[in-house]
Amino acid sequence: MYLVASAVVDDLAALRAGPLWRDVRRFNAPIQLAIAAGLAVGRTSSEVALISLAPCQTGSPALHRWVHDIASGAPGVRMNPTHTLHAVDNLALSVLSIRLEARGYGMGLGGAPGMLWSALELVLERGDPEVIVVAGDQQTGHEDSAASAIALRFAREAAPPQPLGRTVRLVAVERTRAPSERITPHAAAGGCAWLAAVAGYGPGHARYRVPAQDGDGLDAIELLVEVA
């Protein structure tokens, strides 16, 4: 599968100032950015498949404050429907399906570490004509922190515009058992690191060994790509 478009979105201030904000303002930061990234890569067919990763760092500061106030018996606490949205993992998948008018396969993956690589395995296994993978996350859901999102659009056939100024084909995702405790759970960070590495590759085949911090804690993962 060819990587035909990619987007990394991490500027919440710019998102708040743009036209999309009205539609996403009630969601938490990872979902807001994931939707923006998914829309940025677009699609060429309504039959596009969508795969969305849940954040590893779930919720939001507002949600955690609300739950804490309820648990502590603070007076005057009322249910805020907006806060309940912050606990829903598949919002990005739902919103993107509607906005992109996508009628293809859809899958929402959980917020376990390293799920991005499982998503890429699914991209290769299914072989849909076109598929978008989106992921957004934050440093912590308990307090205000940095958030970022990534979207990757793959297609069976190479087609312009190419991300990174070159043709990139994902050939394989390979695993060997290698347990590690050095993981840093973040749904989007591993994909951002992979894109940065691919940008430096010359023509030919290359292997990207996923750093332990971006893995799942169970396997050593390598991505085989072909660059032209």
Image (cartoon, grey):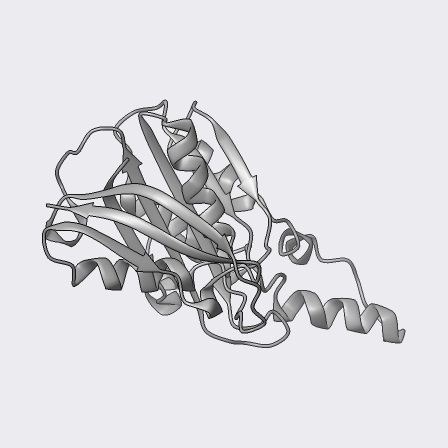
Above or below: residue 17 compared with residue 226: below
Residue drawn at x 41%, y 64% as measured from the top left: 189
Tally of marks:
0
Quarter of the image for the N terminus: give it: top left
Above or below: residue 214 compared with residue 26: below
In front of the other: 172 or 163: 172
Horizontal side of residue 146 vs 43, given as left or right = right
Instruction: Tell me residue 46's x, y (percent).
Output: 34, 24
Residue drawn at x 46%, y 50% as measured from the top left: 175
Horizontal side of residue 83 vs 49, given as left or right = right
Q: Quadrant of residue 171?
A: top left
Horizontal side of residue 160 vs 144, given as left or right = left
Quarter of the image for the C terminus: give it: top left
Residue drawn at x 69%, y 54% as measured from the top left: 84
Horizontal side of residue 8 vs 95, given as left or right = left
Instruction: Tell me residue 31's x, y (percent).
Output: 50, 54
Say if residue 226 shows up in the picture.
Answer: yes
In front of the other: 154 or 27: 154
Instruction: Tell me residue 26's x, y (percent).
Output: 55, 55
Instruction: Tell me residue 130's x, y (percent).
Output: 32, 30
Say if residue 22 shows up in the picture.
Answer: no
